[in-house]
Image: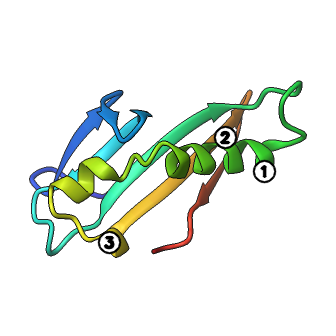
Amino acid sequence: MVDLSGRYILTSNRESGFGRYDAMLEPVDVKKDAGIILEFKVFQPRKEKDLDATVEAALRQIEEKRYESALVMKEVEKENIRKYGFAFSGKSVLIGKAGYN
């Protein structure tokens, strides 16, 4: 178990950029800790071929909607922002991360 209390502020479903992100961990110490953006998607067979495609859709949404803008406004360096897409299908979960800036 990792204790993040005191290091991060957890926010969810807030406006940032051009939309609303699912969850964000905002570092209290922006020079020490990374900012983390989480986007969750449920696999939809009519739209995506597999969980990989669902993860890619989540990561694409983070980029297209510019969710990192809330962290950048709080002086988190772009290269210190981590972006994760989660894809769910029943009990299966796949997590992907965007390349670091």
> Which residue is drawn at the image coordinates 68% and 47% (left, top)?
55
Quarter-of-image position of residue 74? bottom left
Between disc 3 and disc 2, whose residue precedes?
3
Query: Disc 3 or 1, which lies upstream in sequence?
Result: 1
The CA span between labels 3 and 2 is 23 Å
Crowd tier of the residue under label 2, counting other residues whose Cα lies within 10 Å: few below 14, some 14–19, many 20 or above:
many
Q: Residues within 10 Å of mark 3 (few under 14, many from 20)?
A: some
User: Would residue 50 appear left or right of 95 to someone viewing this image?
Assistant: right
Q: Local crowd at mark 1 within 10 Å, few (<14), some, or many (≥20)?
A: some
- The residue nearer to you, when weighing 93 against 68, is 68
Residue 64, horizontal then vertical, whole percent: 54, 47
Amino acid type indicated by mark 3? Asn
Of helix, strand and loop, which one carries label 3? helix
- Mark 3 sits on what residue? 80
Q: Secondary structure at mark 1?
A: helix
> In the image, what residue type sits under mark 1?
Asp
- Which quadrant of the rendered structure holds the N terminus? bottom left
User: Residue at position x 9%, y 53% from top?
Assistant: 6
Marks 3 and 2 in Cβ contact (< 8 Å): no
Pair 3/1: label in front: 3
Report which residue position mark 2 lands on.
87
Q: Which mark identifies residue 52?
A: 1
Residue 97 coordinates in the image, percent (x, y): 57, 61
Q: Are marks 1 and 2 in contact (CB under 8 Å)?
A: yes
Whether residue 41 is visible, yes or no, is yes
